Amino acid sequence: MASEKEVETVIVGNYEEMESEGKPGDIKSKLLSFLWHGGSVYDAWFSCASNQVAQVLLTLPYSFSQLGMLSGTLFQLFYGLLGCWTAYLISALYVEYRTRKEREKFNFRNHVIQWFEVLDGLLGKHWRNVGLAFNCTFLLFGSVIQLIACASNIYYINDNLDKRTWTYIFGACCATTVFIPSFHNYRIWSFLGLLMTTYTAWYLTVASLIHGQVEGVKHSGPTKLVLYFTGATNILYTFGGHAVTVEIMHAMWKPQKFKSIYLLASVYVLTLTLPSAAAVYWAFGDMLLDHSNAFSLLPRSPFRDMAVILMLIHQFITFGFACTPLYLVWEKAIGIHECRSLCKRALARLPVVIPIWFLAIVFPFFGPINSTVGSLLVSFTVYIIPALAHIFTFKSPAARQNAVEQPPKLVGRWAGAYTINVFVVVWVVVVGFGFGGWASMVNFVHQIDTFGFFTKCYQCPSPTSVHPPPLNATAPSPLPH
């Protein structure tokens, strides 16, 4: 018990020191501190829940149409549990790394710890390089997906511009996230983001139930292995939002409490994703196979427009969540990470947004790109690498005996943790990366063959379907020769 208190003191010390630097004096500074500086367990909970459930709310009904109701529900529960376990592993490795560094009198006052640095400190440069490559690539495409989602959503309330043009516009808007220094400054955004996704999830649920089932609705999924594993990897992607775990933990005053926070956040997320996906799939069935965005099937109303607007704002926030670690990596690469000037750092971050903008225009495949990223990148970034890193970090008896974070009794201590880690690696390699990678790439290539690169308006309705002729219209008289 004494050792746990000592570890807590070591970990928390620098944050208390940082906070004491800017003790609010007047009302203006107190308000700024309330909105801007967040490091409590509540801030972490809002960040985890808000970051985990974003535009996937709109694609999960599409996944249910590929998987069927039963498989869709079971995969959500299973991958939710798997995500909680690997988030626990990442938090244990972070606490181990940071405690060792703090005991060596290393100062983190102007330095944000990231996942690749944890791997470097615990396992060496080769692990660092692999972790850095997968993490940065995943976060890059995670940002791309948020930008694509912005264009896809806004089109349903304003189709005067095509989706590509909307991507240009929202790319410029999302570039303003360069002014947010770190996850420590997402307090108000995380809170608002979770309110927005909560409204959207329950709008999808209630609107689908009120709408009722369409005439002749069919629920034939699963019908093809390709579609089945594509849907499964989208759910794998849904609960793989802990690629930013280390950055969120580093923003906390008591990061050792993160593991329980993430579990509670995942439970809350399931209360949003399960009812909404099930209700939309119940109402529209196989129609969702050709409509990856759930908004496209629900009739336009003020409530739907409100949901679209709120999701747009939330995707701006999630873009910042995904991009902030990339900004920090770039700052460290060019040597300005510890610069105290916010404007200089913001200006230096801008080049990171350019490739994201470009890729969102090249691959505007909202829905299929989630599954591809999930199978090829999320599988390694947040499942396989953390499980293997935990095994190798604590492979020796001395390392296990001196570990800061001991595995809980509930899983059987070290033997149980090792068994679960091996299961995670084997399952995700075979099902997530193997079958999921095959299925998602087949589907992704099909989208390219159908729509092509740089498609102007992905899955937009044709003009004839947007403005169908009236049923009682008479045929025009034939033209004279």
Image (spheres, grey):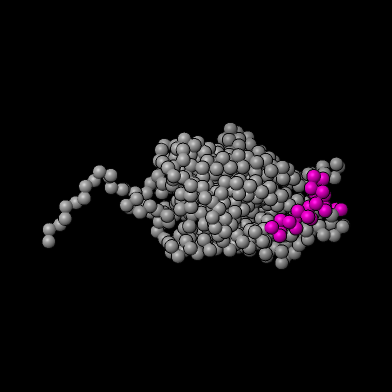
- Asked whether the viewer can see residue 160, the reply is no
Is residue 406 in the magenta section?
A: yes
Seen from this angle, which residue lies furthest left? Answer: 481
Residue visible at 45% across and 37% down?
A: 211
Q: Which region is colored magenta?
A: 401-427
Counting from the top left corner in percent of width and height, residue 408 is at 80, 46
List x then y, in percent, for residue 141.
55, 58
Say which residue appears at 46% left-offset and 64% top-offset.
448
Is residue 70 found left or right of 451 in the rendered image?
right
From what the image shows, is residue 28 above or below residue 246?
above
The answer to which of 40 and 425 lies nearer the viewer is 425
Place of residue 122 in the rendered image (x, y in percent of width and height, measured from the top left): 76, 59
The quadrant of the image that shows the C terminus is bottom left
Tell me which residue sits at (58%, 35%) in the image: 31
307 is within the stretch colored magenta: no
Reply above or below: 244 against 210: below
Q: Which picture quadrant has residue 373?
A: bottom right
Q: Position of residue 116 (x, y in %)?
A: 68, 59
